[in-house]
Each structure stands twice: as C-alpha cells, then as structure tokens.
Image (cartoon, grey):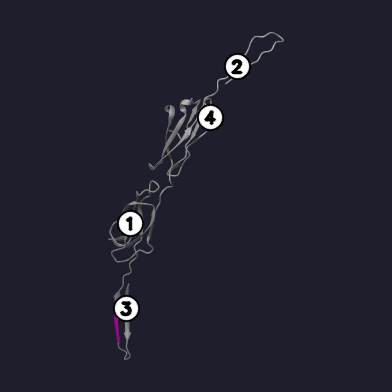
C-alpha cells in the first residue's frame, strides 16, 4: 500500500514524501509425491516437493546448506528432512517443510513344527513371518520332494523320507525376502508281533510274547 509522511519544522514549514510498500507472502512448500523405503535398511526412498510463492524457487534440503532448484531427491534412507524454500522475491519459508521418510520393520521368518512325530501322524509346519509389508508370499522346500506355497502347510502320514531340513522363503509386498529353516524328525511306528502257542487244551497254559 501507499504510505505518506509529512514533516513540519519549527517554522511551520512542511514537506511530504510517499512510498508504495509491497508485502509478499512467504512461500509454503508442500509434498507432491513421496515414496518411503521398501525394505528395512534400504535406500530407495524418494520425495518430490513444490511451493507456493513467486517462481523460480530455491530449495535447501538440509544436506549442505546449499540452495538449488532440485525439487526431487532420490535414493533416500529412512530419515527426517527439513526443507527450506526461498522464492524469487527473496522470501523464505517459515516453518520449513518436514518430510518423514519411513521404512518397514525388519522382515523375519521363524519356522516351527510339531516334530518329532510318528509316521502315522500329521506334520504341521508354521512359517511365523513378521515385519516387512503384508501380504506375504511363501516358498517351502524340504526332503522327500516336499514343496508348498502356503503359509502353514501340513503333510499327512509322512514317511521317514520326510526327515531332514525344511526351509521357507518369505517375500513381502515390496519384494523384501527373509529365509528360515528347521529340522524335522518322523519316527517310524514299531511293528508289533505276538508269539506263543495259539492252540491249547482246556486247563492248559501258554505264554504269549510281544515284540516290537
């Protein structure tokens, strides 16, 4: 707006001056697109920002206090950035834009089973996946040609050929992987036999012997 000042001296003489002052709004930065880190410990985060105010803009991402025109930063690890903007009028953002690049928890898998068991039982395998980004995909492998793509597979009446190490690889929705393994033991059922005289006379005795 216009501002006028009038000065009167001791003799009653006056002088006036007017100026036109312009007040610019501060630029306000904002997030256009944000991609968080896919896997724990990764560095594929990315953020793109824009700003209100008078273009062109100069951005300080907080890495080296050097203003530039870059609006997109890639290959980010999980961290918090504070982005400051200066617009073409020389106005500076206040407050700065806070950008929180996050990462998922570590993807883990801790397989368990109901081993040891008898060959007439049912072998139950449990993957116990956690962390990462659900949903998960599963790939099981093991002895006896065993394979499965479900979280918690079962084998009915497993033979001793299924003794050994079972592994499961878990892949989450972002492509992160975790692998775990365990040893399973199936015990063969004993074979029971009875020996002794099977035909006797009344009043006689016989002995039966059980073997197994």
Work out how far the residue at label 4 is from the one at label 3, CA to CA, in angstroms.
Answer: 97 Å
In contact (CB < 8 Å): disc 4 and disc 1: no
Q: Of discs 1 and 3, which sits in the foreground?
A: 1
Q: Of discs 2 and 3, which sits in the foreground?
A: 2
Q: Residues within 10 Å of mark 3 (few under 14, many from 20)?
A: few
As drawn, 170 above or below 94: above
Which residue does the image show at 43% across and 35% down from the upper left? Answer: 167
Upstream in the sequence, badge 2 or badge 3?
3
Left or right: 149 in relation to 47: right
Upstream in the sequence, badge 2 or badge 1?
1
Q: Which residue is mark 4?
A: 117
As drawn, 15 above or below 123: below
In percent of width and height, residue 114 lies at: 52, 33
Which residue does the image show at 32% across and 76% down from the upper left? Answer: 3
- Element at label 1: strand
Upstream in the sequence, badge 1 or badge 3?
3
Mark drawn on residue 50: 1
Q: Which residue is mark 3?
A: 4
In percent of width and height, residue 65 lies at: 32, 62
Q: Of discs 2 and 1, which sits in the foreground?
A: 2
In magenta, the rendered stretch is: 14-18
In contact (CB < 8 Å): disc 2 and disc 1: no
- Element at label 3: strand
In percent of width and height, residue 20 lies at: 30, 73
Q: Of discs 4 and 2, which sits in the foreground?
A: 2
Q: Of discs 4 and 3, which sits in the foreground?
A: 4
In percent of width and height, residue 120 lies at: 53, 25
Q: Which residue is mark 2?
A: 194
């Amino acid at each position: 707006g216009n501002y006028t000042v009038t000065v009167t001296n001791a003799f009653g003489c006056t002088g006036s001056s007017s100026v036109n002052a312009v007040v610019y709004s501060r630029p306000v930065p904002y997030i256009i697109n944000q991609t968080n880190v896919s896997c724990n410990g990764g560095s594929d985060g990315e953020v793109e920002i824009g700003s209100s105010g008078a273009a062109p803009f100069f951005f300080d991402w907080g890495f080296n206090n050097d203003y530039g025109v870059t609006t997109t930063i890639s290959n980010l690890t999980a961290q918090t950035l504070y982005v400051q903007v200066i617009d073409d009028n020389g106005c500076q953002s206040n407050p700065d834009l806070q950008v929180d690049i996050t990462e998922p928890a570590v993807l883990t898998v801790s397989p368990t089973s109901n081993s040891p068991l008898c060959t007439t039982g049912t072998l139950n395998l449990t993957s116990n996946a956690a962390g990462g980004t659900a949903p998960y995909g599963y790939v099981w492998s093991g002895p006896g040609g065993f394979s499965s793509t479900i979280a918690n597979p079962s084998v009915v009446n497993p033979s001793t050929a299924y003794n050994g190490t079972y592994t499961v690889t878990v892949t989450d929705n972002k492509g992160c992987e975790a692998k775990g393994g365990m040893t399973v033991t199936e015990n063969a059922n004993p074979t029971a036999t009875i020996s002794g005289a099977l035909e006797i006379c009344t009043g006689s005795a016989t002995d039966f012997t059980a073997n197994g």
